Image: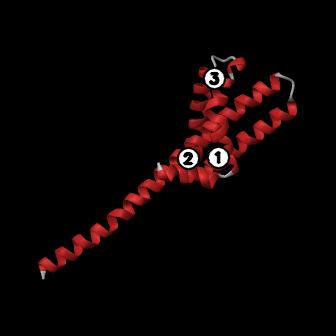
Amino acid sequence: MKLLTAAFTLLFLLTLAPLDARTADEETARNNFASELVECAAYFDICAEGIRRTGNLEGAVKAEAAAKSALDIARIYSRDDVVLARYKLAMEHQIKTIDGNYANLSLLIVKYKDICKQALETPEVRLNYWKKK
């Protein structure tokens, strides 16, 4: 009887292992997606300032709205305090990347333009990207 109980327990635990792995993978994907969205928010806010400096206020407002949307979506997948801390770090990193000079904005555009567009327009597609990674 003890052998049967042990075998059943082992079989039960083995069937749960894939669920735990999938849960961890799902959590990792959501975390990575939230981080990416925060990077996009910083990118859009930096772009907004660069656009504003050219005198295009309408374009700056659109970029700011995109930043807000990215943060709103990130908050679905992560805690607010984590989102805000990541945003601060992303801003610091991206400003450093362009040496604080908006003339170097192309460095960020090359990296973020397509990814961030997809993350906002079809977030489920981008989340699926992270699930497959």
Give neighbour class at mark 2: few <14, some 14-19, many 20+ (Cα, 10 Å).
many
Contact, CB < 8 Å: mark 1 with mark 2? yes
Label 2 sits on a secondary structure element that is: helix
Looking at the image, residue 7 lies above or below residue 132: below
* Disc with the residue nearer the chain's start (3 vs 2): 2
Residue 92, x across and y down, in percent? 60, 25
Give neighbour class at mark 3: few <14, some 14-19, many 20+ (Cα, 10 Å).
some
Q: Which of marks 1 and 2 is in front?
A: 1
Contact, CB < 8 Å: mark 3 with mark 1? no
Q: Three-letter amino acid code at disc 1?
A: Ala
Marks 3/1: CA distance?
A: 21 Å
Residue beneath the point at 54% across and 50% down: 129
Q: Quadrant of residue 87?
A: top right
Residue 76, x across and y down, in percent? 61, 53
Label 1 sits on a secondary structure element that is: helix
Say whether residue 10 is left or right of residue 3: right
Please tell me the numbered disc located at residue 33: 2
Please tell me the numbered disc located at residue 86: none
Please tell me the numbered disc located at residue 95: 3
Say whether residue 56 is left or right of residue 67: right
Residue beneath the point at 23% across and 73% down: 9
* Disc with the residue nearer the chain's start (3 vs 1): 3
Please tell me the numbered disc located at residue 119: 1
Marks 3/2: CA distance?
A: 21 Å
Give neighbour class at mark 1: few <14, some 14-19, many 20+ (Cα, 10 Å).
some
